[in-house]
């Protein structure tokens, strides 16, 4: 019953149900209209013709009456004159009991023969095989009686009932057209909602409010809603840009005096060894400022990068050459599975720096003697580089915040760092046109963090 929770599907199913109900009612109404027309129009028409024939027969005589009827080209009735029979035979036929299946018809038509009247005697009969309506009338011919069968022209009957079928089909066509129109409009609304969802996904992935919801060829309440959302995104982007710019200005203003202080402390520390700790703190602070400025330039597209085609396997080997001693000191095992011919278009310097940050985190937060794995997964269009460890993972709440500036989980607060490593990786990957994803995964039956960096494959 999930369709009940979807307002669009619920509307279509209810419309379908009402349309089928209307069709059933129309079919029933069709039969009712046909019956009522027979009862109120066609049958009285036959009875009137029978009365007219009686009058014409009495006034003009049998021969003249037959001639008048046969020469009437516009007559909608057909006449069949049976062989005259004697009064005695007619009397016996008139008082014969009707068959059981015709009992109701005879009861409705009254007695077939009344000796006190010398006018014709009428009975209404219906031929189901030919679907014809007819009435029988007995008329005197001298001392005999002749049966005349009056039949209504089938063309006339069909012409009277002809409007019912087009009416029924027209209503069904209108219902179907309404259903298709409703489906088309719902698909249009769904498309706009998908645009909203896609814009939200793009904003979340890029962590930037510069994306906008398309609003072309749209008016009305939905257009107003999209306009308000875009206006809100515009304000958020402006506010975020001001905040970043202010942070950049502060960092720039502080970096120059901080660099000067660091150099003076460095000189003093050579003369006074007790200032070595101050030198280290100043160096760490300057490094943090430089990293913040680097991230800011990447996020604001003010950092120029050179894109080139590189061999991914060679890049990973360069990173491992740098961190090989660290892995040996911590007795950590590293497994690498990368094809030698996989190439991507990216910035060599940025990718090297990003991979160094990822592997540095894996080394720091992995216990001694644990495992680290690096491997790739490829499709026809993209290649994904995965780096997984056995650090225990970050949890659902932590995964969503790992790329925030200065965020450090409880597990990482006991180790060195400033909480900017993955923030830099995220900004660098976006700058290079890649995608970054973080997840908790198993590596050799132990839970850890898996960092996946995806790039488009270069054309060979």
Image: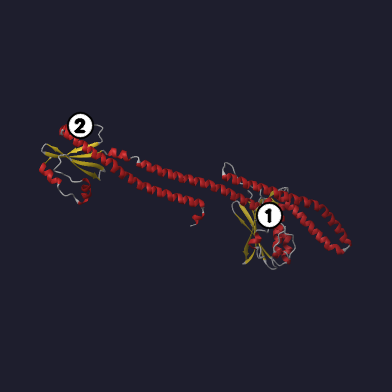
Question: Which image quadrant is residue 341 in?
Answer: bottom right
Horizontal side of 23 relative to 434 (left or right) equals left
Tell me if residue 309 can be seen: no
Please tell me which residue lies in front, 410 or 311.
410
Dot 2 falls on a residue whose secondary structure is helix
Q: Could you tell me residue 120's position as x and y percent? A: 17, 40
Question: Which image quadrant is residue 37 in?
Answer: top left
Horizontal side of 40 relative to 409 (left or right) equals left
Q: Residues within 10 Å of mark 1 (few under 14, many from 20)?
A: many
Residue depth check, mark 1 versus mark 2: number of the one nearer the observer: 2
Question: Which image quadrant is residue 340 in?
Answer: bottom right
- Per the model, the C-alpha gap separating discs 1 and 2 is 104 Å
| Up-down relation of residue 269 to residue 101 (above or below) | below
Residue under label 1: 426
Disc marking residue 68 = 2
Residue sitting at x 69%, y 50%: 431
| Up-down relation of residue 243 to residue 359 (above or below) | above
């Amino acid at each position: 019953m999930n369709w009940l929770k979807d307002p669009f599907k619920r509307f279509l199913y209810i419309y379908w149900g009402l349309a089928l109900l209307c069709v059933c009612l129309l079919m029933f109404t069709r039969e009712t209209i046909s019956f009522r027309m027979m009862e109120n129009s066609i049958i009285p028409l036959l009875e009137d013709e029978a009365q007219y024939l009686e009058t014409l027969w009495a006034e003009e005589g049998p021969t003249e009456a037959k001639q008048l009827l046969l020469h009437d080209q516009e007559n909608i009735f057909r006449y069949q004159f049976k062989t005259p029979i004697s009064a005695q035979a007619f009397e016996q036929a008139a008082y014969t009991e009707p068959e059981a299946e015709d009992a109701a018809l005879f009861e409705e038509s009254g007695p077939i023969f009344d000796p006190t009247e010398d006018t014709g005697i009428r009975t209404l009969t219906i031929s189901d095989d030919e679907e014809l309506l007819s009435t029988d009338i007995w008329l005197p011919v001298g001392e005999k009686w002749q049966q005349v069968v009056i039949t209504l022209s089938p063309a006339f009957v069909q012409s009277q009932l002809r409007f019912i079928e087009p009416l029924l089909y027209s209503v069904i066509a209108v219902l179907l057209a309404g259903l298709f129109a409703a489906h088309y409009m719902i698909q249009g609304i769904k498309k706009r909602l998908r645009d909203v969802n896609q814009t939200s996904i793009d904003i979340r992935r890029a962590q930037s409010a510069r994306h906008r919801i398309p609003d072309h060829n749209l008016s009305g309440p939905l257009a107003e809603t999209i306009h308000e959302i875009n206006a809100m995104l515009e304000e958020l982007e402006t506010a975020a840009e001001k905040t970043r710019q202010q942070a950049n200005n502060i960092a720039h203003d502080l970096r120059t005096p901080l660099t000067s202080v660091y150099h003076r402390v460095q000189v003093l520390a050579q003369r006074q060894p007790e200032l070595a700790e101050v030198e280290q703190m100043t160096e760490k602070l300057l490094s943090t400022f430089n990293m913040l400025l680097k991230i800011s330039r990447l996020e604001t597209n003010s950092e120029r990068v050179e894109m080139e085609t590189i061999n991914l396997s060679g890049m990973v080997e360069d990173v491992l050459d740098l961190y090989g001693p660290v892995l040996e000191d911590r007795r950590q095992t590293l497994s690498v599975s990368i094809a030698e011919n996989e190439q991507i278009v990216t910035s060599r310097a940025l990718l090297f720096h990003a991979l160094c940050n990822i592997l540095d985190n894996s080394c720091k937060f992995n216990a001694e003697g644990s495992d680290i794995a690096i491997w790739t997964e490829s499709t026809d269009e993209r290649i994904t580089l995965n780096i997984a460890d056995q650090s225990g993972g970050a949890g659902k709440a932590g995964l969503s915040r790992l790329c925030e500036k200065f965020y450090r989980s409880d597990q990482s607060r006991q180790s060195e760092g400033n909480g900017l490593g993955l923030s830099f990786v995220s900004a660098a990957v976006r700058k290079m046109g890649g995608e970054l994803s973080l997840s908790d995964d198993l590596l050799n039956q132990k839970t850890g963090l898996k960092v996946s960096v995806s790039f488009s494959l270069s054309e060979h």
